[in-house]
Image (cartoon, rainbow, N blue to C red):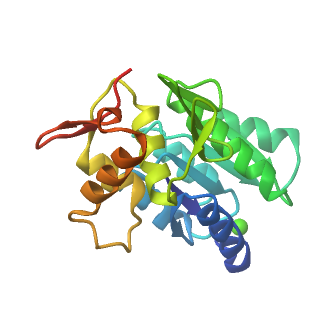
Amino acid sequence: MRVLLVEDEPDLQRVIWTCLQEEGYVVDTAGDGEEGLYKATNWDYDAVVLDVMLPKLDGWQVLTRFRKVKSTPVLLLTARDSLQDRVKGLDSGADDYVVKPFQLEELLARLRALIRRAAGQSTPSIEVGDTNIDTVSRTVTRGGAMIPLTAMEYSLVELLALHKGKLVTRSMIYDKLYDEDDDTLSNLVDVHVSNIRRKLGHEFITTRRGQGYMIND
Ligand code: CA
């Protein structure tokens, strides 16, 4: 899952960035509204966390312009708990908001829910045959037994499972699982897929040669 964090306060940006990374998200950052709008428009994120009070373009302006081109879920960070601000945010196309100061746990829970809803997934766990993918604890179990996966293997399984029955292209995988500073892409995906197959069985992931991968529904 790849997320864009648009926040101009360095300390808060660092705290949220660290927290999201620890939860397994790939996180790009922007420090003002212009940069945020540029990145949100040009890359394909699973969600955007957008502060309202930003230099250059404020969150409302970013949101209004962004919504003309993309429907990526947006979680607003609003400064004041005023009804007017919340209504304005939702009317401008925000999908949800948290009010500063917020608990990181709440931000994470709302973000998970947004990403789930965008993928058409109403519950936090995904079933693939007898395999269960729990997107809250980020664990995979089969027949009740925990399958040990690395963070990257889990992220890949989750991405494929969220799109089960559909082809996930290699470029989608690169977009979602590697951040803007990562240039070590080439064959890594194949290595992760083969490791996942060792743990979950070869048939768990289908290869579409030259196109990508899928988990059958
Ligand atoms: Ca701010």
Task: Tell me residue 35's x, y (percent).
Answer: 47, 67
In-front residue for pair 140/106: 140
Residue 104, above or below 214: below
Query: Which residue is depicted at the point 56% across and 58% down?
Result: 24
State whether residue 95 appears in this view.
Answer: no
Tell which residue pokes out farthest to the bottom in this image.
Answer: 10
Task: Tell me residue 114's x, y (percent).
Answer: 62, 37
Is 87 displayed left or right of 151 in the figure?
Answer: right
In-front residue for pair 49/79: 49
| Quadrant (top left/top right/bottom left/bottom right) for the C terminus | top left
In-front residue for pair 142/86: 142
State whether residue 135 appears in this view.
Answer: yes
Query: Which residue is depicted at the point 61% across and 38% down?
Result: 145
Residue 8, above or below 44: below
Q: Which corner quadrant of the image does residue 25 belong to?
A: bottom right
Query: Which residue is depicted at the point 83% across and 58% down?
Result: 100
Is 115 displayed left or right of 100 in the figure?
Answer: left
In-front residue for pair 131/54: 131
Task: Tell me residue 198's x, y (percent).
Answer: 36, 48
Task: Tell me residue 123's x, y (percent).
Answer: 65, 26
Residue 3, above or below 119: below
Tell which residue pokes out farthest to the left in this image.
Answer: 210
Location of ligand 1 given as a quarter of the image: bottom right
